[in-house]
């Protein structure tokens, strides 16, 4: 077999293998974003012009999140927040409007204590979506009640 024939056979094979590898990489990347962000992935895709733009936005959220100094709460702070949360829930039947406001302030304080920026509701949603994409819809619904 001549060198020209070998090149004519090998180059297309290499190109096809590269295309398969790139496709597999893109699928894996998309799957990882879907798993990490849960329903937030679909919400972001629906709100953007393209899937590519949505995935770029989600990767941007991940990068911002990596740059934050998120920290675990000490056990005593966790216990205090849990007790406050229980108190808000117990008062809810008697004072629903006030408790929704109290719960929102409690969550905002908790976010701040853990190191999340709290500069605005939409940014809070974007920051929380990286670790809490599967439960973020509950936060949105509760916030909309208030």
Image (spheres, rainbow, N blue to C red):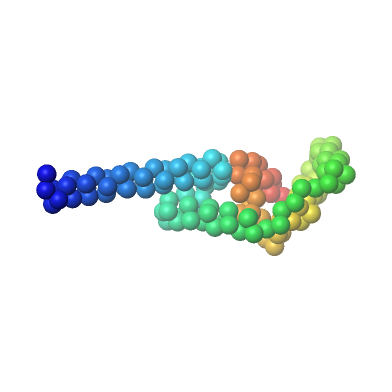
The residue shown at (63%, 55%) is: 65
Q: Quadrant of the N terminus?
A: top left
Whether residue 98 sits left or right of residue 16 in the image: it is right
Front residue of this view, candidates 38 and 94: 38
Q: Is residue 33 above or below residue 56?
A: above
Asked whether the viewer can see residue 9, the reply is yes
When asked about the image quadrant of residue 64, the answer is bottom right
Question: Which quadrant of the structure image shows residue 141?
Answer: top right
- Residue 40: % across, % down: 55, 46
Residue 67, given in percent of the width and then of the height, sits at 64, 59
Q: Residue at x 42, y 53 (%)?
A: 52
Q: How many marks?
A: 0
Q: Return the x and y of residue 142 as percentages of the image width and height.
A: 69, 45
Residue drawn 64% across and 44% down?
Answer: 132
Give the residue displayed 14% in from the left and 50% down from the top: 3
54 left or right, relative to 144: left
Q: Is 75 or 94 nearer to us in this picture?
A: 75
Picture coordinates of residue 33, whole percent (x, y) = 51, 45
Q: Is residue 108 visible?
A: no
């Amino acid at each position: 077999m001549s060198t020209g024939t070998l090149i004519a056979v090998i180059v297309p094979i290499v190109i096809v293998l590269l295309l398969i590898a790139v496709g597999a990489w893109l699928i894996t990347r998309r799957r990882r974003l879907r798993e990490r962000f849960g329903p937030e992935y679909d919400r972001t895709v629906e709100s953007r012009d393209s899937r590519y733009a949505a995935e770029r936005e989600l990767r941007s959220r991940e990068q911002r999140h990596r740059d934050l100094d998120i920290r675990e709460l000490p056990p005593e702070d966790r216990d205090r927040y849990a007790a406050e949360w229980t108190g808000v829930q117990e008062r809810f039947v008697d004072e629903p409007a006030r408790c929704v406001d109290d719960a929102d302030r409690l969550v905002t304080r908790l976010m701040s204590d853990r190191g999340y920026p709290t500069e605005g509701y939409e940014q809070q949603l974007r920051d929380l979506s990286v670790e809490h994409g599967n439960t973020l819809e509950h936060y949105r619904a509760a916030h909309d009640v208030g």
